[in-house]
Image (spheres, rainbow, N blue to C red):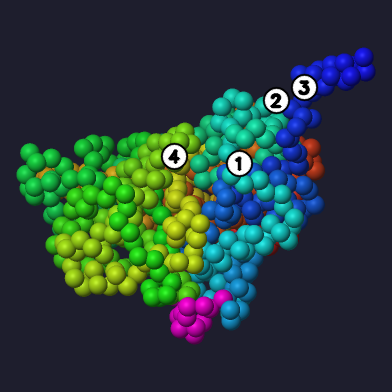
Amino acid sequence: MKVCKVLIVVFLCSIFLPTWAQKNTYSADVIVYGGNASAIIAAVQVKKMGHSVIVVSPDKHLGGLTSGGLGFSDTGNKEVIGGLSREFYQRIYQHYQKEESWLWEKKSQFGNKGQGTVAMDGANKTMWIFEPHAAEQVMEDLVKEYQIQVWREEYLDRSRQGIRLKDAKIQEISTLSKKHFVGKMFIDATYEGDLMALAGVKYHVGREANSVYGEKWNGVQVGVFQHGHYFKSKISPFKVANDPSSGLLPEVSTEKPGPNGSGDHKIQAYCFRMCLSNHPDNRRAFPKPEGYNPDRYTLYARVFESGWRETFDKFDAIPNRKTDTNNHGPFSTDFIGKNYDYPEATYARRKTIIKEHELYQKGLMYFLQNDPRVPSEVQERMKTWGLAKDEFKDTGGWPHQLYVREARRMLGKYVMKEADALGKTKIEEPIGMGSYSLDAHNAQRFVTAEGYVQNEGDIGVHPDKPYSISYGSIVPQEQECQNLLVPVCLSSSHIAYGSIRMEPVFMILGQSAATAAVLAIQQKTSTQQVPYSLLKERLLKDGQVVSY
């Protein structure tokens, strides 16, 4: 009889107990969804403020792009990088003070070139240029030192069963593995903004028309060339040169751009930031990828025929004879036009898109090393490079993170706009700063009215001075969600996001978001109603730079 009563009690509990009281349920004051640098920094800040936190990471490796190949940091004005973001670069500096960190070259051989700054700043004990594994180790060290609980390869269940909401507050989120995470505050630090979207927060994907926010550099920008990433010569896009009846070459769109300044669904191109090595003992040859078709690189061959020779201009040096290799020129590592559906795609579709980017880029490297149409001097130099053997070991040297330059962007309490990111306005309630140029990569490759191939969307406009980022840009509208902060897919126009979207800034915003989350708990209020005076006081105490 007693056994029957126990069974009945267990059965009733399974029905009536809230999910947080059931198996596979984990709770903390703050739940951070994401595994990139912003997410880890946010978690560290929560612990520093004496509260509990759980990181729910869809990634196996921590650090996102910071540990995923982007080692030639987009610093802008490094004076406005403060708090835990600066501490990250100080820890990188300490790493490279150790003799054993220089395995493939001597420290004296490295040089000291950074992006707009020195690579190694001895006066401030910061280093802005680093190898992927060094960045990942810093992230792992932070997790260990602050005893942060991290669940890896846990993907948010993006169905209605993946979230429990009550009175515009998230009570709980669930993952595909049926784990449940209960918190008082939630931070969506992913590049995609999946939690934000699941919570019913409004957002935008694509480029707004200039008329929406009174901007100049948003929307379609045909004929605007502010970097060197366009076709400088008249090059035919057709399979048989100058013969439209032969059909278009691969990687050229049949779609025509809209009028300049108009909005569209297109987003700037993605790529992988490859870590290459030219040390004979630390490089992997580029294999012929599955499905390799040299025809898809015919445009590149025609660029070479035109006399273009800038292939190696963005093989940016990082320590130990390695590179952070980025897109450069009219035809390069950016897989233009092949990511439009990524932001809202299913996990399966995203996996396919990521694989397509990988095969395109691996094919490009193989083409440069092996195709007879590549100029001999370019090919011979290219053969001295390969994937670094001691990076990304579990993926054969290939980066574990696609460079998702832009995905969803929240429509929050405040929208950061072009004028804000150019330093032309006074921002209320600042929580950190940006200073990089308005930097958007190409969004499409099309055929001009004259019958030639051209790229569109590449913008690079420098701000007047460093600018503040509003607290309102990382919180949703109050009626939508009251206990969520979004430091990566924040509220911004496409072109303002072109400046904000830098890894040091994401770390800054991660720390500020975490600070606000803890203060909201302590004040027993919504994220929107956190007293800014308290928030600013704590940010300044923790070394954040909020105004210039």
Q: Is residue 119 left or right of residue 376?
A: right
Q: Is residue 42 magenta?
A: no
Q: Disc 1 marks which residue?
A: 154
Residue 14 is tagged as: 3
Instruction: Tell which circle, 1 or 3, labels the residue nearer the N-terminal end.
Output: 3
Q: Amino acid at mark 2?
A: Lys
Alpha-carbon neighbours of circle 4 within 10 Å: few (<14), some, or many (≥20)?
some
Q: Secondary structure at mark 4?
A: helix
Q: Is residue 439 left or right of residue 228?
A: right
The answer to which quarter of the image holds residue 341 is top left
Q: Nearer the viewer, residue 361 or 111?
A: 361
The quarter of the picture where the C terminus appears is bottom right
Q: What is the CA distance from the residue labelled 1 to the residue labelled 3?
A: 24 Å
Of mark 1 and mark 2, the one earlier in the sequence is 1
Is 117 colored magenta in this rendering?
yes
The nearer-to-camera label among 2 and 3 is 3
Q: Earlier in the sequence, mark 4 or mark 1?
A: 1
| Local secondary structure at mark 2 | strand
Per the image, the residue denoted by label 2 is: 166
Q: Tell me the number on the disc at residue 350.
A: 4
Which one is in front in this view, the residue at disc 1 or the one at disc 2?
1
Q: Which mark is residue 519?
A: none
Q: Quadrant of the N terminus?
A: top right
Q: Which amino acid type is shown beneath numbered disc 1? A: Glu
